[in-house]
Image (cartoon, rainbow, N blue to C red):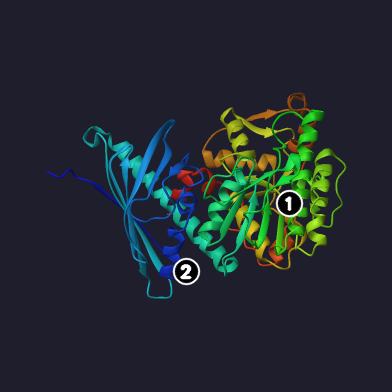
Amino acid sequence: MMKTTTLFSWKSRFDCSVAELYNWHARPGALERLIPPWEDTWVLERNREGISPGTRARLRVHFGPIPLSWHALHLSDEPGRSFCDEQSRGPFAFWRHQHLFTDSGDGGSILEDRIEYRMRFHGFMPAVMKKHLRQRLENTFVSRHATLAADLAVHRRCSNQSLRFLVSGAGGVLGRELLPFLTTGGHEVWRLVRRVPRADSREIYWDPAQGEIDIEGLPEIDGIIHLAGENIAQGRWTEEKKRIIIDSRVKGTFLLARTAASMPVKPKVFVSASAIGCYGNAGSQWVAEEQAYGGDFISEVCQRWEEAVRPAAEAGIRSPLLRIGVVLTPKGGALHQLRLALRFGIGRLGSGEQYVSWISLDDMISAILHAAVCPELHGPVNVAAPQPVTNRELMAAMADCLAVRAPLTVPSWLLRAWFGEMADQAILAGCRVRADLLQGTGFSFRHPTLASALPHLLGSDREQEKKK
């Protein structure tokens, strides 16, 4: 006798054709883009890209604090209509997921995610656990469909043609999200790596410290996206650490810019990361791109970083310098660290009045693509959400989203004792930037406020319930 399964279905309409919707799912990176930010889930390996029958992927998922392995197998694929995958090994007794694509009849399309599942020990599982699983599924597919709709909107504006990019820093927090975002938009990505490139892969060897780069196997490219650089917020700033921070940015940037300038067919654009730290501690004043560099170490790093792009710019390659704010993602960086602080009841760092010009990770990767294709952008470009907040406001909003109490303050003197010089320049300093130039060229934020960004990033059940 066949055992009973539970059916879960989630359906949404999208402003694109059925072909566009299906093609997005069929491209490399779709699975990575559909994992909600708040889920501690990683794609570990796959036998090949795509969704054709026989494609396998192994993921690491978490149920609470427990890590589990999930093996997925694609069973069928009807191009433009549907595809189906199932769990071949994992935490469920049975799991089958159908993706159904239909025309909405009004110029759009409809995606229905239909999942049939059966939990292990279903008959012995308390009702509250079953309800919790269904709530988690709802939250997951609210997030998946919201990300999909927003990504499709960006690609309708920015991905009219397939472009080929060479990307540095592809293994970092930002790069790991950027690559699947680009490939699902139909772009081709080549990665710079500091090891021997794997056979039959789109990898190019480089060693910035030694001034080495091997572009012999690189085809003509449309653009370079340069994100690589030593983590500035990791460890105390000893003189050796400062040297590594500067060299990792200046040497790598100069090498790539000089290489781009010498290519027989030059790329059209060289997008280089920088940081709003270039302005120093600006207090509560609003800061635009015309503001002079500050006088501290981070400002010096950013100035030398940006100047290293000069060979590309002088060769006529459009060179946007993205002065990036605090990128919020639970996968690393400031949001990850602040979330740990909240768990210990810490709700303020220093006075708490220092301004934080933040941006969600999804908006950050969208801004990179926008800068790569927007001919009006060159030179310094502030990249931060339109509503900066103070440290006190940011941590209070996070505490509310996570439903935790955080009444404690870490005094400034303790931060200075623990982090040294970095405390005054990266933790206690403030910068309130304007992104008018970015928005003036047609960029639209999917998360303009913390109220929209934090539930998406942290997965607050309470906030999801409010939306229903």
Residue extending furthest toward the left? 1
Q: Are marks 2 and 1 in contact (CB under 8 Å)?
A: no
Q: Which amino acid, by three-letter code, is at mark 1?
A: Leu
The image quarter in which residue 119 lies: top left
Q: Earlier in the sequence, mark 2 or mark 1?
A: 2
Split into 4 quadrants, where in the image is the N terminus? top left
Q: Position of residue 89 (x, y in %)?
A: 32, 39
Read off the residue under disc 2. Answer: 15
For marks 2 and 1, give the CA distance. 38 Å
Determine the residue positioned at 35% across, 41% down.
133
Q: Position of residue 137 (x, y in %)?
A: 38, 47
23 displayed left or right of 227: left
Q: How many marks?
A: 2
Q: Secondary structure at mark 1?
A: helix
- In the image shown, does 101 or 200 lie closer to the viewer? 200
| Residue 256 disc label | 1
The answer to whether residue 431 shows anywhere in this view is: no
